[in-house]
Image (spheres, helix red, strand yellow):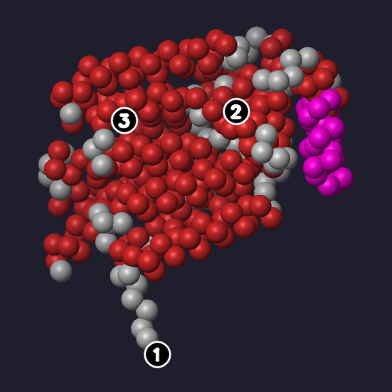
Amino acid sequence: MKKINFNNTNILFAYYFVFAFTIVLVGMLRPALNWDMIGYVAAAKHFEIMGIVELHQFVFENLKNFVTPDEYFLLTDGNSQYVIDMATKPELFTQQLPFYEIRPLYTLSILLISKFGVNIFAATYVMSLFSTVLGIFLLLLTFKSKIHMGLLYILPFFLMFFGILSTAKLSTPDAMVFLSLSIFIYLFSKEKVMPLLIIIPIFVLVRTDMIIFNFIALVIISFLYKDCIVKSFLSFLMTIALYLFINHYFHNYGWSTIFSMTLLERVSNPADVNFTVSVIDYIHAFTRGVYTSLDDRAFLGFISVVASSLILMRTFTKSFSDNKEIWAYTVIPILYIAIHFILFPVPWNRFFIGFYTMASIAMLLLFSQLIKKYD
């Protein structure tokens, strides 16, 4: 009987194909039908239907035909006054749209997929599944010659541990953020700096909080590539311009409203409420977030990965420039997650899956160096 050679590239790609196929299969058979699906469908269809009543009618009539009666009840009633208001009052429903419309690359993708005959509600998680699979194979193509092949077999386990499957099943732009970070990693690893500087501003069209990532990444690029300082600055100016345009065009709510709706109290009429976040409110939310994080296995796993990398880097990698990938893929997640947590103290895995993955890749690169050194 012929022995399987796991160092064969074809075997590795087949392994990743099976992994990706499993994610798609599970995602299509058992998608996570959360209420955000309704918000993103409404935001996508709002490009075509301007009338408030007509938009509301389209969304909930099509939802009723898409889900089971029990699922429809949970999404439109579920003994929640907020959900009932959304299903019965178009004027309140439209007040939620800015929370979803500020992700235009995701909502336009939903609309585009629906034009190919896919149900517009299914399109919300089809886009997530597509983004996840493409991101996974981009990472494989990036590191098949940089990370020890044996360690590449471990990467899918890291992805599963950090919640890639649940993210892929969600009707949110978080899987598209994972893809965005995979594109960044691919271009950064290949040292394709100019395409990277052109593409980075687009990330805020996926999720506006990517402005934090853009700032951190562009500072690191400026530090590593001195001849790109001006170009990096222009890239960040474009990031800011797109960020401000999105918020202005879609009438996005301010930080206080988003913080309050996310962490304090979800109301049906945010446009009519003057939200303020007191120091006590913030301390309570932050304390609750810290407590939740200490019981979150993905967050604790990330801490363990980063701690391991920092210990190994102190011992084996002295130069930033000679090990820029390792340093960048460790520093960026630490700074992004810290800043994001200060602004919105929740350890939701879907926000951070791409950054958890980035930190894991840094650790695998370090272990690859050690294996090569002691082989």
Q: Is residue 160 magenta?
A: no
Marks 2,3: beta carbons within 8 A: no
* Circle 3 SS class: helix
Residue at left 61%, top 47%?
A: 169
Classify the position of the C terminus by image quarter.
bottom left
Quarter of the view holding residue 273? top right
Q: Which residues are magenta?
A: 57-86
* Circle 1 SS class: loop
Classify the position of the N terminus by image quarter.
bottom left
Residue at left 40%, top 42%?
A: 182
**Label for residue 195?**
3
Mark 1 surroundings: few (<14), some (14-19) or many (≥20) residues within 10 A: few
Quarter of the view holding residue 21? bottom right
* Circle 2 SS class: helix
Residue highlighted by disc 1: 1
Q: Is residue 74 magenta?
A: yes
Q: Earlier in the sequence, mark 3 or mark 1?
A: 1
What amino acid is labelled 2 in the image?
Leu
How many numbered marks are there? 3
Marks 2,1: beta carbons within 8 A: no
State how far apart marks 3 and 1 are (Cα): 48 Å
Residue 75 in view here: yes
Residue highlighted by disc 2: 108
Between 256 and 179, the one nearer to me in the picture: 179
Between 78 and 89, the one nearer to me in the picture: 89
**Which residue is most to the bottom?**
1
State how far apart marks 2 and 1 are (Cα): 52 Å
State how far apart marks 2 and 3 are (Cα): 23 Å
Q: Earlier in the sequence, mark 2 or mark 1?
A: 1
The correct choice, above or below, for 41 with respect to 368 in the image is: above
Residue 335 spot, x, y in % from top left: 34, 33
